[in-house]
Image (cartoon, rainbow, N blue to C red):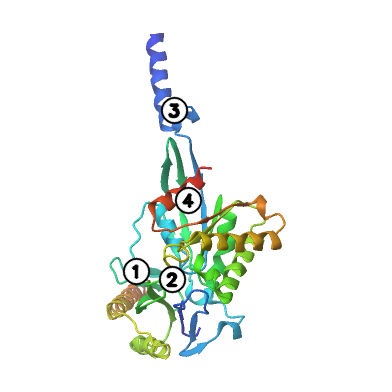
Amino acid sequence: MLPFILTGVGIASLITAYLTDGFGLWSDDSSEKYLAILGLSGAGKTRLQYYFRGKHYVEGESITGAFGKELGQAKITEGKRTIVIKKGHDIEGTLNGLKDYTTSEINKADIIFFLFDMRNLLSQKEKDNVLGYFDFVFVKNTLKKKIVLLGTHCDESKGFNASKLFRTQVEEIFSSYLSDTYTDSKNHIEEILLVNLKSDKDLRLIKQKLFK
Amino acid sequence: MENLLYIQHEKSGEESYVFIQDKLISLQSHPDLNLSNFIKVKSYFLKINSRKNPKGILHRNPFNGYVITGVLNEKDTYGRTMLFSCYYNGDLNQLDKYIDNCLNQIDKSINQECLKFIKVNIRRFVVLRNVLLLGVISLMAYQIFK
């Protein structure tokens, strides 16, 4: 009788263990992350949120709007590793929207992506807007969470901002701004990446940042 | 509360268009104006979402107003379809005039399909409210006169 009972208990344990992710013994090494994707209007926040969640971005889609958009949970994999992207919020990139949502997004975040349209660094007014918002994000990031800076739209002004020279200029503008303004910025600025969010190669590069 | 209409500017970093009643105002000259009180209703009584394009969202809040998100015919500088958000608690027959009046001042226009969606669903809300009211009154009358 005893062998039957032991076998039964063993099978029941195995089923329980399977249903509860193996008590961590054979879990798939997945971790959960909340992504705060911040930036001014048109920087590419929605496109990036959609990419991480496997949603198709339709060109000419409507702007995010005053309510923002609630986004579902998703899983992404890189090799054998999996990350669960927690439910999130695609925020409106106007000053009103950013004022309302930036702090709460940063507080929830495991990683912060700060997006800016590279072309905006060329005119003084738009540059001030980008850097002004970055200041706001930096000040609100009291827990010094890692920030990935993404300069976007490097595809848009062909032959110009795609050039090495322009990329170097953008990197220099941000690097010198950071080192002049924030002495400890190197501790939590993960990287400055200049990307084209329409390029699969660049999107994969951004994805890799989640697995670092 | 007064009617309010809000539109994100077509250019990044520019101040959004805000109308109080049908007067275009600058947010900088109204620093105490909290848009969240008007258009970002957290608790609403009912919500209808348009599943098809063009997008339209209608919220009915408990204090007699409607919070509406709708589509314009114009695109922003990034080629995205522009939206408006509106808090409205006036005469429902005057809603399209109110929206048109505001939009004309900034050379914009509402998508007609979207306007149709809004008007049809406001009518549904009104019918639903009347049915509910009638139900409650009938129950009360039954309790009193039985």
Mark 1: amino acid:
Gly
Viewport quadrant of the N terminus of chain A:
top left
Q: Position of residue A196 (x, y in %)?
A: 43, 59
| Residue sitting at x 64%, y 51% | A188
Q: Element under label 2? A: loop
Chain of the residue under the numbered disc 1 shown in the image: A
Residue designated by label 1: A60
Disc 2 designates what residue? A65
The kind of secondary structure element at disc 4 is helix
Q: Give the mark nearest the N terminus, 2 or 3.
A: 3
Pointer 3: what residue?
A: A17
Q: Is residue A177 above or below residue B20?
A: above
Report how far apart the C-alphas of labels 3 and 4 lie in the structure.
35 Å
Q: Nearer the viewer, residue A26 or A38?
A: A38
Residue A115 visible: no
Query: What is the secondary structure assignment of the residue under circle 1?
Result: loop
Which chain letter matches label 3?
A: A
Marks 1 & 3, CB-CB < 8 Å contact: no
The alpha-carbon separation of the residues under discs 1 and 3 comes to 48 Å
Q: Residues within 10 Å of mark 4 (few under 14, many from 20)?
A: some
Mark 4 to mark 1 CA distance (whole Å): 23 Å
Q: Are marks 1 and 2 on the same chain?
A: yes
